[in-house]
Image (cartoon, rainbow, N blue to C red):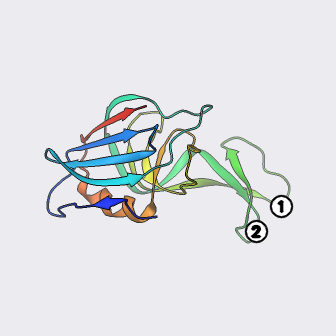
């Protein structure tokens, strides 16, 4: 799923990200100008995306979750998609951590923005998922320290 709207200057860094949870949208700013809007998938009621003001504290192109993943068989087929670190996999399966490509970390406990699946409603474990192609295009334009506002 692409951005709803993209008018980004590729030679200009992003200066602010705003996440609106009730709209399930991300607003991207360059300077004082709105440069892009994208759909998101935020956290569920059981695993909410935290509200407030954050900054991008780390970036990692090929991040893998240290909390969540899935059980897969020997051919790589996902058998159980909601596994957590420390769960014992059933016989014949193994644990694989979730891929979180183009990760922009917001909190020390693992919340960030990254490419992923967007079902059209809040369904993550607290992170903000973006369309993968959008996350890939956005990633190099977001410097460490970029302010991020998350509101309901």
Dividing the image into 4 quarters, which one contains the C terminus? Answer: top left
- For residue 116, side relative to residue 18 (left or right): right
Q: CA distance from mark 2 to mark 1?
A: 7 Å
What is the quadrant of residue 105 in the picture? Answer: top left
**In this figure, what is the number of numbered marks?**
2
**In the image, residue 124 above or below residue 133:** above
- For residue 37, side relative to residue 66 (left or right): left
Secondary element at image label 2: loop
Please provide percent x and percent y for residue 138. 31, 58
- The first of marks 2 and 1 along the sequence is 2
* Residue in the image at 28% along x and 61% along y: 6
Q: Which residue is mark 2?
A: 74
* Residue in the image at 41% along x and 47% along y: 25
Please provide percent x and percent y for residue 21. 45, 38
Dot 2, how many residues are within 10 Å of its Cα: few (below 14), some (14-19), or many (20+)?
few
- For residue 45, side relative to residue 19 (left or right): right
**In the image, residue 14 above or below residue 133:** above
* Residue in the image at 46% along x and 37% along y: 22
Question: Mark 2 touching mark 1, by CB under 8 A?
Answer: yes
- For residue 51, side relative to residue 17 (left or right): right
Query: Which one is in front, 96 or 119?
Result: 119
Dot 1, how many residues are within 10 Å of its Cα: few (below 14), some (14-19), or many (20+)?
few
* Residue in the image at 24% along x and 56% along y: 141
What is the quadrant of residue 16 in the picture? Answer: top left
Please provide percent x and percent y for residue 145. 24, 40
Secondary element at image label 1: loop
For the view shown, which residue lies furthest in the bottom direction? 75
Please provide percent x and percent y for residue 78. 72, 62
What is the quadrant of residue 107 in the picture? Answer: top left
Q: Which residue is mark 1?
A: 92
Query: Which one is in front, 57 or 11?
Result: 11
């Amino acid at each position: 799923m692409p951005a709803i709207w993209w008018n980004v200057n590729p030679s200009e860094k992003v200066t602010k990200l705003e996440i609106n949870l009730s709209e399930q949208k991300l607003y991207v700013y360059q300077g004082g100008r709105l440069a892009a809007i994208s759909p998101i998938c935020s956290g569920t009621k059981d695993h909410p995306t935290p509200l407030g003001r954050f900054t991008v504290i780390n970036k990692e192109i090929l991040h893998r979750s240290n909390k969540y993943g899935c059980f897969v068989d020997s051919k790589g087929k996902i058998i159980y998609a909601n596994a957590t670190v420390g769960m014992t996999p059933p016989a014949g399966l193994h644990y694989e951590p979730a891929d979180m490509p183009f990760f922009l970390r917001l909190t020390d406990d693992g919340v960030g923005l990254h490419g992923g699946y967007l079902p059209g409603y809040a369904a993550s474990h607290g992170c903000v998922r973006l369309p993968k192609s959008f996350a890939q295009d956005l990633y190099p334009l977001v410097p460490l320290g970029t302010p991020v506002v998350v509101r309901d």
